[in-house]
Image (cartoon, helix red, strand yellow):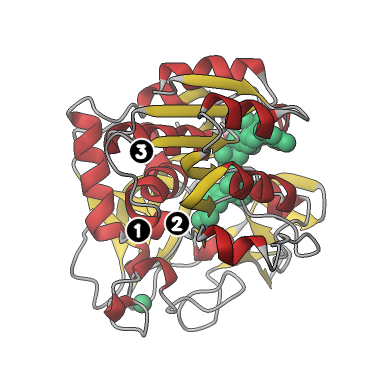
């Protein structure tokens, strides 16, 4: 089967790889759609260190073809979304209501038993997030699989696997945005647009979208931003002036840079909440002033996967979509074939799409 593989930094190939049958507690899925998230690009360029070679893709939906022994919650024919974080329900974090930190999958893109179902020329391949969604088929842990209604187009449902759940969840669960509040979202790609939608659903009165790209700002208005700011050296000054010198109640960073997390914190009012959603380089850091930070009573939160529980949140988000309250269709700005994967990543880097999606015909 065809898969998008990274063998060495900064280069992808689309090639034939072998996939074994699912073992116990595993599921084989025929892929329908895989979203192109910046985190995949971060594996290609080394921002996110990952063992190579790896099959990319961690935001996807498809149809179950086969289940291994002991799988009871899904069966062949089911439409499913894969969660980039599994949900074992039993580990330290799952039992504390922190499914987004589930410890079940081993590091390095293997299955739960530490081995891979993917090989190339006899050598094992990792699967990003134990999924590897940018391939015609996937074998993944059953605890990463959430069945969904067949009413939902799979190319729309795919976005739930990472970006939308992360973004909407950042607003609803991580920050718990309150009705009537003022929100700033720095970085309006797929994740940032989902944060804007989450803030809108939460009833925020004012949502500032901030990006370096005018076209992203234009798009952001369509998804619920009430104000837009082209990011430049004066962003903080402008934003502060527009909030009567107070700052915003909640500021979200959805780029992945220490400097823009610092901007988010600086833009947050005293006592407010800044949320770091973007994933930056290991060598980058966020500076906090030892005097000003405690006295400001601000909160700075890291956000993993929108503080989501996939079995609770995937159906909830798809219900919001079906009721017209969450625009997922509008986020899919272009589809690509798997052979066009390079183009999809080039377009992501150039900021052309809200979300590009690889579809499998
Ligand atoms: N925490 C998590 O669980 C989680 C989950 C998914 C993605 N992410 C991360 O979220 C980030 C965003 O992902 P995405 O898929 O939306 O990426 P994207 O490339 O689609 O969007 C990034 C946006 O940031 C804008 N931007 C870049 N530099 C900027 C600057 N200096 N000021 C203002 N805007 C700027 C770009 O124009 C673009 O619109 C990535 O770092 C990704 O790895 C985190
Ligand atoms: Zn992602
Ligand atoms: Zn767990």
In this figure, which residue is indicated by the disc labeled 2?
Answer: 305
Residue 198: give its label: 3
Identify the residue shown where x is 46% and y is 26%. 332
Label 2 near ligand 1 (CB < 8 Å): yes
Q: Are marks 2 and 1 in contact (CB under 8 Å)?
A: yes
The local secondary structure at tag 2 comes to helix
Q: Is residue 184 above or below residue 8?
A: above
Q: Are marks 3 and 1 in contact (CB under 8 Å)?
A: no
CA gap, disc 2 and disc 3: 13 Å
CA gap, disc 3 and disc 1: 13 Å
Residue 308: give its label: 1
Identify the residue shown where x is 70% and y is 51%. 42
Identify the residue shown where x is 64% and y is 43%. 255
Residue 176 appears in the rendering = yes
The local secondary structure at tag 1 comes to loop
Query: Which mark lies nearer to you, 3 or 1?
Result: 3
Q: Residues within 10 Å of mark 2 (few under 14, many from 20)?
A: many
Identify the residue shown where x is 33% and y is 26%. 327
Q: Which quarter is ligand 3 in?
A: bottom left
């Amino acid at each position: 089967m065809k898969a998008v593989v990274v063998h060495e930094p900064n280069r992808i190939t689309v090639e034939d790889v072998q996939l074994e049958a699912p073992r116990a507690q595993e599921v084989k899925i025929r892929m329908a759609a895989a979203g192109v998230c910046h985190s995949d690009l971060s594996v290609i360029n080394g921002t996110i260190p990952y063992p190579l070679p790896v099959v990319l893709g961690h935001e996807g939906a498809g149809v179950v073809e086969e289940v291994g022994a002991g799988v009871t919650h899904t069966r062949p024919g089911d439409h499913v979304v894969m969660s980039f974080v599994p949900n074992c329900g039993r580990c330290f974090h799952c039992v504390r209501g922190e499914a987004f930190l589930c410890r079940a999958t081993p590091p390095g893109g293997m299955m739960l038993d530490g081995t891979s179902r993917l090989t190339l020329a006899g050598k094992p391949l990792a699967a990003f997030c134990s999924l590897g969604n940018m391939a015609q088929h996937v074998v993944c842990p059953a605890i990463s699989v959430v069945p969904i209604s067949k009413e939902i187009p799979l190319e729309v449902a795919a976005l739930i696997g990472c970006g939308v759940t992360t973004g909407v969840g950042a607003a609803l669960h991580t920050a718990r945005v309150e009705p009537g509040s003022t929100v700033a979202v720095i970085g309006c790609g797929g994740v940032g647009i989902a944060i804007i939608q989450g803030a809108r659903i939460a009833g925020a009165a004012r949502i500032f979208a901030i990006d370096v790209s005018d076209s992203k700002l234009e798009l952001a208005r369509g998804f619920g931003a009430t104000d837009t700011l082209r990011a430049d050296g004066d962003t903080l000054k402008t934003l502060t002036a527009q909030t009567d010198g107070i700052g915003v109640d909640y500021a979200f960073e959805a780029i992945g840079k220490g400097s823009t997390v610092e901007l988010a914190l600086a833009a947050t009012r005293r006592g407010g909440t800044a949320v770091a959603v973007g994933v930056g380089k290991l060598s980058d850091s966020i500076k906090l002033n030892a005097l000003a930070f405690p006295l400001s009573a601000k909160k700075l939160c890291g956000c993993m996967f929108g503080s989501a529980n996939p079995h609770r949140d995937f159906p909830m988000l798809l219900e919001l979509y079906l009721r017209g309250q969450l625009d997922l269709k509008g986020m899919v700005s272009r589809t690509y074939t798997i052979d066009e994967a390079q183009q999809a990543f080039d377009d992501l880097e150039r900021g052309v799409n809200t979300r590009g999606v690889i579809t499998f015909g």
